[in-house]
Image (tube, rainbow, N blue to C red):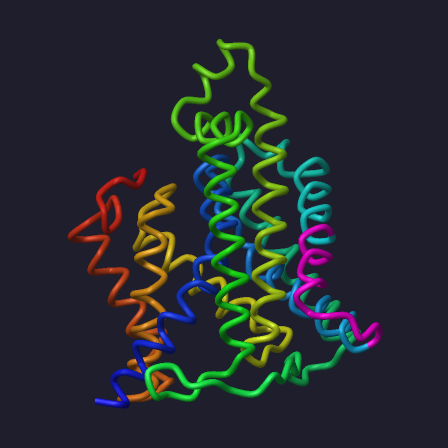
Amino acid sequence: MNLLLQVVVSGTLLAAVYYVLSLGLNIILGVLDIVNFAHGAMIIMGSYTTFYLHRYTGLSPWLLILVDMVLVGALGAVLYLAYLRFTVESPLVRMFALIGFSSVVVAAILAMSGSNFRTVQVGYGTIDILGLPVRVSQLIAFGFALLLGTLTILWLNHTKVGVAIRAVTDDRVALRLCGVNDQRLSLLAFTVGAALAGAAGGVIATYVTFGPDSGLSFAIIAFAVVILGGLGDFAGAAIASFIVATTQTFVTVYWSSALINTTLFLLVLLVLVLRPRGLLGRGRL
């Protein structure tokens, strides 16, 4: 019973991190219909930025997550302005461009940092939750991810810009007829999505070990959450994050970590067959 309780507690704490991990991808997919194959690279850039700035400046990694958002968000804006906006009619070209960008990022990290795995040592000790020892750093990561996710949802639902971005998702043509510059909104959506990927990388850096190639595994998790929750359905993504995190923890504890990706694939396949619009049936096809 204690082991099962530990799975639930660990899965719950990890779910908030996975939600932020998928949030930027969900915005970019939902607004721009761009499958961001560079999402994992953007996440890992945030992780390495937090790691090195924390090492050389001694600043709190939680403050450095804001730096991750600015740097990765700015890079996302440059990438969109310099290239992606010209590939609207060429999704295949865009896909290979994003894969190429991801490869360049991984190669650059390997050249500058090597292949060793890293993590940000936060410390703070442990506390008991329901009789289980839990690292304080995990609770902080959970709280920070929860705050970031909540603020993003409030921004999308209760500000004019956020509502306009959601309107792009529903009907871009009608928005143009209303005199709204949808290209600026697209740029903003991609920038915000990239910034959230950087923030997720910063949170992940305090949670697990990571290496230059870890972005791929993080991206797989993000895609699984988005597909399970339904494209553009942020409430569904929250539920999906808990399911994915708990499933991963359960498989690791009771079976083998080598089966995690296989289990996620089967779970995603099952949902695509039974609930193609996501768990709540509200996602886009």
Of all residues, the one furthest to the left in this rendering is 274
Q: State the residue at coordinates (52%, 67%).
A: 216
Q: State the residue at coordinates (55%, 62%).
A: 144
Q: Which picture quadrant has residue 209?
A: bottom right
Give the camera-side residue of 42 and 166. 166
Vertical order, 5 against 234 (above or below): below
Relative placement, left or right, of 99 versus 6 is right
Q: State the residue at coordinates (58%, 52%).
A: 196
Give the camera-side residue of 167 and 107. 167
Give the camera-side residue of 95 and 56. 56
The secondary structure making up most of the magenta span is helix
Residue 65 colored in magenta in the image: yes
Relative placement, left or right, of 99 versus 282 is right
Give how far across and how far down residue 103 sits, in percent: 64, 62
Give how far across and how far down residue 88 sits, in percent: 55, 31
Give the camera-side residue of 140 and 263. 140
Residue 7 colored in magenta in the image: no
Relative placement, left or right, of 84 versus 136 is right
Q: Which picture quadrant has residue 173?
A: top left
The magenta span reads 56-70
